[in-house]
Amino acid sequence: MANHDLASSSQIKKLRYIENLYGHADRLFGSHALDDALGSLNDAVLADILESWFISIRNQPSVGPADESRWRTGYEFIVSIVTWLSKTTLSTDHLRQIEARLHRLSHLYGQLHIRQSRHTNQIRSLPASVVQAL
């Protein structure tokens, strides 16, 4: 679903998530780090930003569905910008190299999920009479 198909409240929420990603990158990597990495298509820095942002979200004391949405929104934002930039400004050889890097990023981060695994129920011991019957 394209952003223009979303309700305005959903668009605002996605923009806040992206702003959160920018703030994270600025705090950890310096002012304008995300823009610089996107502008130069620096996949190593983009990977560092994504990884540290994922960890910062995942390590919160309380993680919920909104955090999963925040992660997906930031990740999809980076992928869409890199895809758009690489197709509009690069030569064919450089485009292939960027597409390979994008595939690598997608493979690394596309499968990560914020939600913590559910805890299994505690295993209870069987009563002695059941154990003897076995």
Image: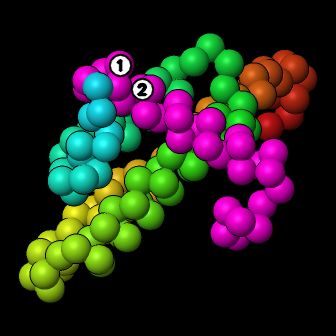
Q: Amino acid at mark 1?
A: Arg
Mark carried by residue 81: none
Q: Which residues are magenta?
A: 1-30
Dominant secondary structure of the residues highlighted in magenta in the image: helix
Q: Position of residue 7 (x, y in %)?
A: 83, 56
Q: Position of residue 8 (x, y in %)?
A: 80, 51
Q: Quadrant of the C terminus?
A: top right
Q: Position of residue 54 (x, y in %)?
A: 45, 35
| Whether residue 83 is visible | yes
Where residue 68 sits, quadrant-wise, is top right
**Circle 1: is it few (<14), some (14-19), or many (20+) Cα within 10 Å?**
few
> Marks 1 and 2: in contact by CB < 8 Å?
yes
Q: Residue furthest left?
A: 93
Relative to 71, say whether 22 is above or below: above
In the displayed structure, does residue 128 sit left or right of residue 13?
right
Mark carried by residue 24: 2
